[in-house]
Image (spheres, rainbow, N blue to C red):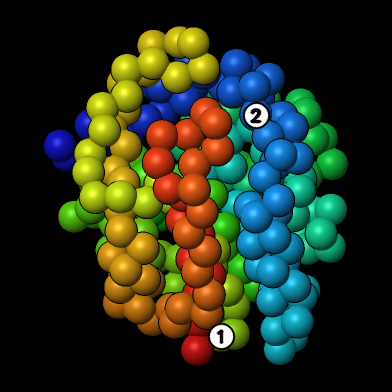
Amino acid sequence: MTASSYLNSVRASYDAVAVASARQLGTELAGKPLDRAMLAAFAECVRGAEGGGGAVADLGCGPGRVTAHLGGLGVRAFGVDLSPAMVAVARRTYPGLRFEVGSMAALDVADAVLGGVLAWYSTLHTPPAQQPALYREFARVLAPGGHALVAFEAGDERVRLEQAYGLPVDLDVYRMPPDRIAALLAGAGLTEVARLLRGPAPHEHGPQGFLLARKA
C-alpha cells in the first residue's frame, strides 16, 4: 500500500466516525487508571525537563479528549489530526485549545521546539515499513530533553478493520511488539525511559502497550 492510499483511507474513515467517536470516547479515560498514570508521568517529565513547560503536540488527536486531559495536567498541549472532521469536532468541544489539520509524518513545526510529543494510538494504522519515518519526525520536533509517549496495541499482526463506532471504515491496524516500538524510537534517537504493558479492557481485543522515551 502506498503512503497516499493508506492516508486517504485513514482520513476518510476518521472523517466518517468523528462525531460517533467523540460521543463514545468522551469519558473513556475515567475507567483506565493505568493509562492516566502514564499520561501523568509524561506530563510531569515534560514539566520537569530543562527549560520545562515546552508545548506538547498530541499527534492524531482525534476529537481532542486526550489533548484536553494533558491541558488539565498543566502542560501546553495542542492537537494535530489528519481528519478535518475530527479537528472540527475537537475545536467545537474544546474551543480554548488549538487543533490543526496535518500529518504526523510531515509536521508544520520547527526543529527542536517541543517539550513533548504524544502518539496516543495514532501510529497503529501506519504500515511498519513506513513507521521509522514517523519516529524520526517526532525526534526532529522535540527539543533536547523532550519526551515522547506512544500508546499502541501490543502484538505482532495486521488486523483488518471494516467497522468502528458502529460505522463502516477501511482501516488496517498493525499490532506491534513493545520491543519493536522501542527499537523504532531508539533508531530515531529517542531513549526508552519506561514502558507499561497492561491487559485488555472489556472492549479491547488484546494487551495494550505504552512507551515513554526521551531525546538526549
Q: Position of residue 54 (x, y in %)?
A: 71, 72
Q: Residue at x 55, y 38 (%)?
A: 201
> Is residue 190 depicted above or below 120 in this figure?
below
Q: Nearer the viewer, residue 197 or 110?
A: 197
From the viewer's perspective, tell me whether residue 17 is left or right of residue 207: right
* Quadrant showing the N terminus: top left
In the image: residue 154, left or right of residue 94: left
Where's residue 37, x and y in %?
A: 70, 60
* Residue at point 22%, 43% (across, down): 157
Does 7 sit above or below residue 74?
above
**SS class of the residue under badge 2?**
helix
Q: Amino acid at mark 1?
A: Pro
Could you tell which of marks 1 and 2 lies nearer the N-terminus? 2
The picture places residue 209, in percent across and down from the top left corner, at: 46, 56
Residue, x 37% and y 30% (percent of image)?
10
Q: Is residue 130 above or below residue 146?
A: above
Q: On the image, numbered disc 2 is attached to which residue?
A: 25
The secondary element bearing badge 1 is classed as strand
| Label 1 sits on residue | 144
Q: Is residue 2 left or right of residue 110?
A: left
Q: Say if residue 37 shows up in the picture.
A: yes
Q: Nearer the viewer, residue 118 or 15?
A: 118
Q: Residues within 10 Å of mark 1 (few under 14, many from 20)?
A: some
Out of 174 and 7, give the one closest to the viewer. Answer: 174
Can residue 98 be seen here? Answer: no
Q: Residue at x 64, y 62 (%)?
A: 38
Q: Amino acid at mark 2?
A: Leu
Is 11 rendered above or below residue 153? Answer: above
